[in-house]
Image: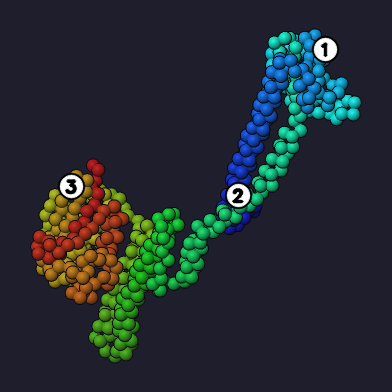
Amino acid sequence: MRLGPRSLRARLTLVVTLGAAAAVGLALALLYITLDRQLATTLDRDLTARGNDLAAAVAAGGADAVARDPLAQLYAADGALLAGSPSLGERRLLAAGEVRHLDTDRLETRILPARGGAAEVVARVLSQPLDDARVLSVGVSVEPLRQARQGLLQVLLLAAPLLLAAVAGAGWLVIRAALQPVDVLTREVASIVSFDAERTLPTVPGDDEVARLAATLDAMLVRLRVAFERERAFVDDASHELRTPVAVLRGELELALLAADDPGERERALLTALDEAERLSRLAEDLLLLARERAGSLILREEPIDLLDLVASEAARLRPALGLRIRVSGDPVVVVGDDVRLRQVLVNLVQNSAAAGATTVRLHTTAGPGAVALEVADDGPGLPPEVLHAAFERFVRGERSRTGRGAGAGLGLSIVRAVVTAHGGTVEARNDGPLGGAAVTVRLPRHPG
């Protein structure tokens, strides 16, 4: 259960207010202590100056100056009272024993009790021995100091809530202004219900955290829109590719039913339907492989494979099947991988060359320091320039397509990239191959042994 405010603005304001309260309280406490010390110092300084003036007057023979002082007494060396202010009456600033033992100036706070109708007085008393062994005591009431302290405390206690309210209000306004772009971004993102519209988030001026957040969210929307467009194009292309063989399959089956009295025509229709069913099966398997690769669940067997030996055996199988001249050369190299999937890579690349009209294909292996390269080059027309940069995307075809109807649905090179990536390798295509046509280079990690 949340105890604090729900909104970020309120929580930040609360934190600012609490921090300001601590700072204001500390500042006002320091101010009170400083002013109190200054008032006490001023009182003691004035008392000392008055005592020195009175002592000078007494030394000059003017003992009657003590009687005119509002709070002063003059004592003999034995403690006897010689002169004093009428306001003191019978009260003494110093006891007789204290007078006899006083040997240096003494400044202290004393409480003069109520006596003879006079009220109790709390006073600061300065006692100082004179040159003739007499002692002079001068006092001043601390009541003005107490009243000043009380007035200062009242002012500070009244000012603290007002100052704190002002700080909280200013903090609220500043935080609201700082978070306003976040509110705008939130409303804009909430209003985007589809990636069909080319909507962008408003630009936040500056280079602070909020501006960087807005730029990051806008870039994320662009990436999501691109991904959405790719997935939609994938679904559209897959639907288109599936629609044709399904329609052909249905037509051939209907034709076989109508040709019940013609065994030859019925057999031809069923064979055509079987071809289309096989094409559908291959397309479904290709789509499943790509889906597993994107989900990271493409399972590969890991075993040492002599890549040159695999290439040579697969070339011997493909020569009569595709009617190509396939040359194999290179270094004996060992990789760790899935024999079936690597053969699938090789078959897709060679079939791609055959579909493009190539007559000769060269398969060449090269051993590098940490990787193994397999180059598949042909003498065909090369990849169409308009799709060279995206040759390994799904359902990518150019006007001069390298994938004929019998070669697949435009997923061959996508499957090559998916399998190679799953093996921890890379693949790239170019049009300046050694035979004058396209060249696809597959790089795989080398076996550590």
Circle 2 sits on which residue? Answer: 17
Mark 2 Cα shell of 10 Å, populated few (<14), some (14-19), many (≥20): many
| Camera-nearest residue between 21 and 193 | 21
Q: Is residue 64 among what the camera can see?
A: yes
| Camera-nearest residue between 306 and 382 | 382
Of circles 1 and 2, the one toward us is 1
Hey, which residue is sitting farthest right in the picture?
116
Task: State the image coordinates of residue 345 (x, y, percent, origin top left).
Answer: 24, 60
What's the CA distance linking mark 3 and mark 2? Answer: 66 Å
Task: State the image coordinates of residue 367 (x, y, percent, origin top left).
Answer: 17, 48
Q: Name the residue at 69% across, 13% down.
A: 104
Of circles 3 and 2, the one toward us is 2
Circle 3 sits on which residue? Answer: 368
Task: State the image coordinates of residue 384 (x, y, percent, origin top left).
Answer: 18, 70
Q: Quadrant of residue 364?
A: bottom left
Task: State the image coordinates of residue 185 (x, y, percent, origin top left).
Answer: 47, 64
Horizontally, residue 92 falls left or right of residue 23, namely right
Mark 3 Cα shell of 10 Å, populated few (<14), some (14-19), many (≥20): few
Horizontally, residue 336 falls left or right of residue 43, namely left
What's the CA distance linking mark 1 and mark 2? Answer: 63 Å
| Camera-nearest residue between 314 and 186 | 186
Q: Name the residue at 54% across, 59% down.
A: 176
| Camera-nearest residue between 130 and 45 | 130
Amino acid type for the residue under numbered disc 1:
Ala
Amino acid type for the residue under numbered disc 2:
Thr
Q: Earlier in the sequence, mark 1 or mark 2?
A: 2
Q: Callout 2: helix, strand or loop?
A: helix
Circle 1 sits on which residue? Answer: 80
Amino acid type for the residue under numbered disc 3:
Gly
